[in-house]
Image: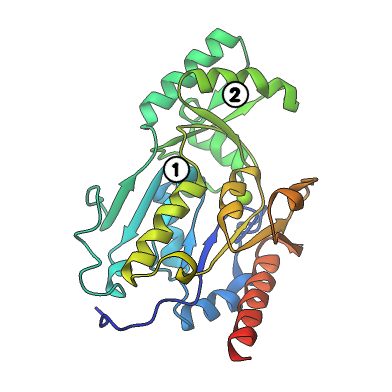
Amino acid sequence: MVDRDSSPPSHLVFTDLDGTLLDHRTYGWKEAAAALEHCRKNGIPVILVSSKTRAEMDVLRRELNLSAPFVSENGGGVFFPQEAFKDAPAGAFPSKIRGQEGSEGLWQWPLGVPYARLVRALSDMRKSLGLSLKGFSEMDVSEISRLTGLDEKSARLAAMREYDEPFIFEGETPDDLRPLHKSAAERGLMVVSGGRFHHLMGNNHKGNAMARIESWYNKQYHLSGHGCIPTIALGDSPNDFPMLLRANFPVLILSERNFPDLEKRIQNLKTTQYPGPKGWNAAILNILSNSKEKADA
Ligand SMILES: [Mg+2]
């Protein structure tokens, strides 16, 4: 534990994974290594926020050498590795954490709807709407591997769902999705579209999880209002927009998709010049060096 007088991090970084910190096709992140290292050296937490599962993300955050909390399944679960508390001022943990200890040394805030209920709801929706939908729970590991481009070992981790059922839906135009949105809403659920799949989930989203984590950090340093730690959020898909809307420094990572008018909806939005980790790297280094210049001036 560090002492109570330790200064707060200069920023909190909240980031999507696929198509953002990870290359959409190869899942590589090496092009972001310089910015990740910069964050690590400067004590800036990098908080992974993804539609991936806890099992997938726990592997990845170890590979990236990250100890900050992370958010799985579109805001369904927030997980705190034991190391996340090492840097917390005395008393900030564990008493303030609600939830239970995870099976792999993780502490959890469960925010989403349990998976079994989502699987039942998707099946009911298919029957009542007569649509061709197929969820992860109906796919074997090789099919998940084929659709995601993940190897079988990773696909197995991707199938360990807790709060979010990804599904494919044939014949999709934005209009075709309307009955699905309506049917989900009637069940107290929602459908969100990510880069590869649509997702059936509770009314949790990445922005809510981000808000909870922000206040966890700010409380540790007794910060409030304008004194709160500034946030950077990076993403490439509509399921990231609630996070970008909250952030002081919202970053849209370049992808093949266009989001007209997004810059009108999200103040200060910056779009990167490059996709994936290369765009991530440039955006983070740019924001942090501009902030430092301002602070030094
Ligand atoms: Mg993405």
Which quadrant holds residue 193? top right
Query: In front: 181, or 296?
Result: 296
| Label 2 lies in ligand 1 vicinity (Cβ under 8 Å) | no
Q: Position of residue 132 (x, y in %)?
A: 63, 17
Q: Is residue 52 visible?
A: no
Q: Position of residue 14 (x, y in %)?
A: 52, 61
Query: In front: 253, or 148?
Result: 253
Image vertical order of residue 88 relative to residue 188, above or below: below
Q: Amino acid at mark 1?
A: Arg
Query: In front: 10, or 50?
Result: 10
Q: Residue at x 42, y 19 (%)?
A: 120
Q: Residue at x 23, y 58 (%)?
A: 96
Q: Position of residue 143 (x, y in %)?
A: 56, 34
Q: Is residue 80 visible?
A: yes
Could you tell me which secondary element the residue under label 2 belongs to? helix
Q: Name the image quarter holding the C terminus.
A: bottom right
Image vertical order of residue 26 relative to residue 158, above or below: below
- Tell me which label, 1 or 2, sits earlier in the chain: 1
Q: Amino acid at mark 2?
A: His
Estimate how packed mark 2 is, as few (under 14), some (14 to 19) or many (20 or more) residues with alpha carbons within 10 Å: some
Q: Name the image quarter holding the N terminus.
A: bottom left
Q: Which residue is mark 1?
A: 156
Query: In front: 148, or 215?
Result: 215
Q: Position of residue 160 (x, y in %)?
A: 40, 40
Q: Which residue is mark 2?
A: 181
